[in-house]
Image: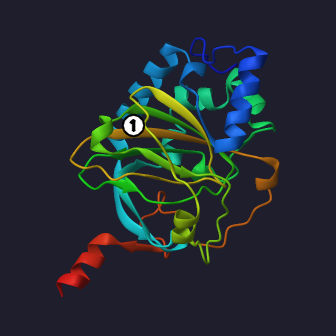
């Protein structure tokens, strides 16, 4: 039986617009893709993300050794649960959307070979919540922003393109002092495409309690398919990974 479709997903772009989009993406490692997506699809993603968060969210408050102990403070819905959402899974496989993304990135996209990283929903909700400086294990992600606070509250995305991740020695502070940092605000309903493996990025911590929700869809490039992972740092799937340091434990040691 063919999979169910959910209306028109991707808005067709002319060749000149695609060329400019591809050039910008190669230069900055990021591209606003909101106008690629139909309003009906935006509304569908927002409803699904909020439903899954209401039913399945788990809190994370930790620092990660493989990114220089940068902070992760947010609620998450792991990939295996998100994958059970029929509309989200259908969008991930949508050939129309994939063809447009491949035209922009300039290579074939493959389903993420690590099922725990195929999807992720996150919600910043408390003062100080942030996804600290990091890279992705795989090449590309399409990030949907169903909910976002006003610009002055925080949650903005910051990026440094054309960097590399050495998990044993990430050198994040060195990248910060040697390169310009580009900052982006995404409003509710926005979507952006990110080169995650070579773009160092983070969200600015929330200045006060507010809500920022994203759905992350990850794809691999050909170079990613044979990768092996030896580091136990997949914090979104398991808060107890050995690379994670609990912020609560940190605070208790300080108080002692």
In the displayed orientation, state which residue is furthest to the left.
255
Tell me if residue 64 can be seen: yes
Name the residue at 67% across, 63% down: 164
130 displayed left or right of 16: left
Q: Is residue 29 above or below residue 21?
A: below
Q: Position of residue 201 (x, y in %)?
A: 52, 53
Q: Position of residue 203 (x, y in %)?
A: 42, 50
Name the residue at 69% across, 42% down: 27
| Camera-nearest residue between 157 and 78 | 157
Indicate the secondary structure of the residue bearing disc 1. Answer: helix
Name the residue at 29% across, 78% down: 250
Q: Is residue 234 above or below residue 254?
A: above
84 displayed left or right of 153: right
Scheme of colours in the image: rainbow
Q: Which residue is mark 1?
A: 52
Q: Quadrant of the C terminus?
A: bottom left
Please rate how many residues cluster around mark 1, counting C-alpha atoms within 10 Å: few if below 14, some from 14 to 19, many from 20: some
Tell me if residue 233 can be seen: no
Can you tell which quarter of the image residue 91 is in?
top right
Q: Is residue 52 above or below residue 200?
A: above
Can you tell which quarter of the image residue 162 is in?
bottom right
Q: Quadrant of the N terminus?
A: top right
Q: Position of residue 39 (x, y in %)?
A: 49, 14
Total marks in image: 1
Name the residue at 75% across, 39% down: 109
205 displayed left or right of 100: left
Q: Position of residue 239 (x, y in %)?
A: 42, 65
């Amino acid at each position: 039986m063919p999979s169910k479709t959910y209306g028109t997903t991707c808005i067709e772009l002319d060749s000149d617009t695609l060329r400019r989009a591809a050039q910008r993406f190669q230069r900055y490692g990021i591209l606003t893709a909101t106008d690629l997506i139909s309003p009906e699809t935006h509304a569908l993603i927002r409803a699904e993300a909020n439903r899954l968060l209401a039913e399945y969210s788990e809190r994370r408050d930790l620092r990660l050794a493989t990114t220089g102990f940068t902070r992760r403070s947010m609620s998450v819905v792991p990939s295996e649960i998100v994958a059970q959402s029929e509309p989200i899974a259908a969008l991930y496989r949508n050939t129309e959307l994939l063809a447009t993304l491949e035209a922009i990135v300039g290579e074939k996209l493959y389903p993420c070979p690590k099922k725990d990283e195929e999807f992720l929903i996150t919600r910043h909700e408390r003062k100080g919540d942030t996804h600290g400086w990091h890279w992705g294990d795989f090449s590309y992600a399409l990030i949907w922003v169903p909910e976002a606070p006003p610009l002055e509250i925080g949650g903005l995305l910051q990026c440094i393109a054309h960097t590399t991740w050495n998990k044993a020695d990430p050198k994040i502070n060195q990248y910060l002092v040697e390169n310009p940092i580009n900052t982006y605000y995404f409003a509710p309903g926005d979507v952006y495409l990110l080169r995650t493996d070579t773009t160092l990025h983070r969200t600015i911590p929330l200045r006060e309690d507010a809500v920022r929700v994203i759905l992350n869809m990850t794809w691999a490039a050909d170079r990613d398919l044979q990768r092996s992972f030896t580091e136990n740092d997949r914090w979104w799937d398991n808060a107890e990974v050995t690379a994670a340091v609990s912020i609560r434990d940190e605070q208790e040691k300080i108080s002692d």
